[in-house]
Structures are given as C-alpha cells and as structure tokens.
Amino acid sequence: MSALTLLANTDCHINAGCAFPAPGLHSFQYKPIFSVGGIEFTKPMLLAVICMVIVVGFFWAAFNKPKLVPGKLQLVGEIGYNFIAKSIATEVIGKKGKQYIPFLMSIFFFVWLMNIMSIIPLAQFPATSRFAFPVALALLVFVTYMFLTFKTHGLKGGVKNLVWIEGLPKPLVPLIILLEFIQNVITRPFTLAVRLWANMFAGHMLIVMFSAAAWYLVTPSFLSVVAGGSLLLAIGMTAFEVLIQFLQAYIFTLLAAIYISGALEEAH
C-alpha cells in the first residue's frame, strides 16, 4: 500500500481522538485484481509484468534494427549495455563474461525497474519488497550458478569446486567441507534474496511511516511544524531511496556475476 493510499483512506489526525494509523505488514498487502484458477493476481504481480514488458520492449526496440550511427533509443540501449559489460561482466568474469552480458543485463534492469516503482505515481510500490520476487530471482541466479559449475567441471569436479580447498590440514577437512557447503549451496541464495528484499521493504516502510506521520500531525496547532519536519524527512527518504534502488540492483547483478565467475574457475 502506498503512502498516498494509506492517507486517502483515513481522516485521522492527532486532535481527532484517534490512534496513529501506523503502517505495518498490511501496507504490503493488496486485494487481488482478479483470480485465475485459484491464483490471485495482485498489484505487485502487475508491476512485475509491467517491468518485464518495459525491459523486453525497450531493448527490442533499441537493438531490433541497429544502425552504425545510433539513434536516441539505440544510444541509450548501448549505454546500458556498455555499463553492464564493462563494469560487471568483463570486469568480474573476464573474457568469458561477454556471453553472460544479456543475462546480467536482464537481471539488472528488471530489478532496478521493480525497485523504481516505489516512486512512480500510481504505482508507488517496489515489487521487490514482496519476498517472493527476490526469492525467484535468487533461485534463477543459483540454478545458473549450479548448472555452470557442473557443466564446466563435471560431477566430481563440480563438487570439488563447491566444497574443496587445497592444502588444508587433514583434521580440518571435514569442518571446512561442511562450512564451504553451507556457504556456497545454502547461504548464497538466501542472502542474495534477503539483501534485496530487506532494503526495499525497509525503505518503503520508512517512506510510508513519515508520510503517514506528516498527515496525522497536521493540526492548527504547533504540531504542524512537526508535521512539516516529518514531510521533509519523507521527501529526503524518497530521494535517498532512489540511490538505494540503483545500488541494490547493481549489487544483486554484481553478486550474480561473482557466482558465475566462481562456477567457471578451477577448484580452489
């Protein structure tokens, strides 16, 4: 639920004898738009579909008929491509990174757009603040990581790549194997999903909290000054959130590239 939606649904102010309409988990719940076969289609799902269509549609339009002298759309697309190619793909993975640029581009721009939805009028909700979306994206990266690990090294080599470290004292081998397994197979997808989700969840909650507080404190009394301060904090948090939205998309994509690079490397 966006801050504006929360405020539009209440006339509650501090001098009206009502409690502060504090945002909570209900601020992230939406009534289904429609249902198909028992599956409820909600606003976050709609936003995810819109973001997917925008990413696919934009890059298709930009590169469908590339020209030697690019037009404005192709130029923007090339800037996005070069950003991912140079700062993530080839920088992290190396020469082999070129073949993974489309995958990394898709992840970055899809995540970034879903994050940006929190500041877009009418949308005003980051789809990635719903845990299912970061989990699905993290699983996609994890499956790619596992696939490349075993495709590159085979079954025995893949297992060695995941859990084995050369030169360890024999008494430490069982413990290190266990720790490496937990880190590479369990912790990686979990932290990848939680990092993105937690930042988007917290950011949206803070913006809604300060916006609701500004509305609640608006009175003819001196509290209006406090309400103005809360509104300024909401605006400041929104501006700061724009930076966080980009950074979280970048970090998510960077970690995906690091995992791919690890899958292609020899066992350590």
Image (tube, rainbow, N blue to C red):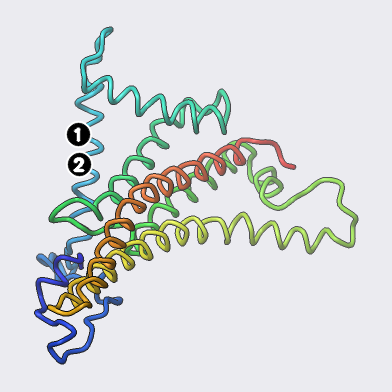
- Residue to which mark 1 is pinned: 57
Q: Amino acid at mark 2?
A: Val
Could you tell me which residue is drawn at 87 percent across and 47 percent down?
167
Q: Secondary structure at mark 2?
A: helix
Q: Is residue 193 left or right of residue 182?
A: left
Residue 53, numbered label: 2
**Image x and y of residue 122, in percent:** 13, 56
Residue type (three-letter) at the residue carrying disc 1: Gly
Q: Mark 1 and mark 2: span between their CA atoms?
A: 6 Å
Q: Residue at x 43, y 46 (%)?
A: 247
Q: Nearer the viewer, residue 108 or 102?
A: 108
| Residue in front for this viewpoint, 73 or 221 | 221
- Residue 235's label in the rendered image is none
Contact between marks 1 and 2 (CB within 8 A): the answer is yes
Report the front residue among 126 and 31: 126
Residue 229 appears left or right of 34? right
Where in the figure is residue 11, as x and y percent of width and height? 9, 79
Element on which disc 1 rests: helix
Q: Residue at x 55, y 26 (%)?
A: 96
Task: Pick the quarter of the image with the C terminus.
Answer: top right
Name the side, left or right, on which 103 lies relative to 209.
right
Q: Quadrant of residue 178?
A: bottom right
- Circle 2 Cα neighbour tier, 10 Å, few/some/many (<14 / 14–19 / ≥20): few
- Tell me if residue 257 comes above or below residue 60 in the rendering: below
Q: Position of residue 30 (x, y in %)?
A: 18, 70
- Residue closest to the far bottom: 17
Within the image, what quadrant is residue 66 found in? top left
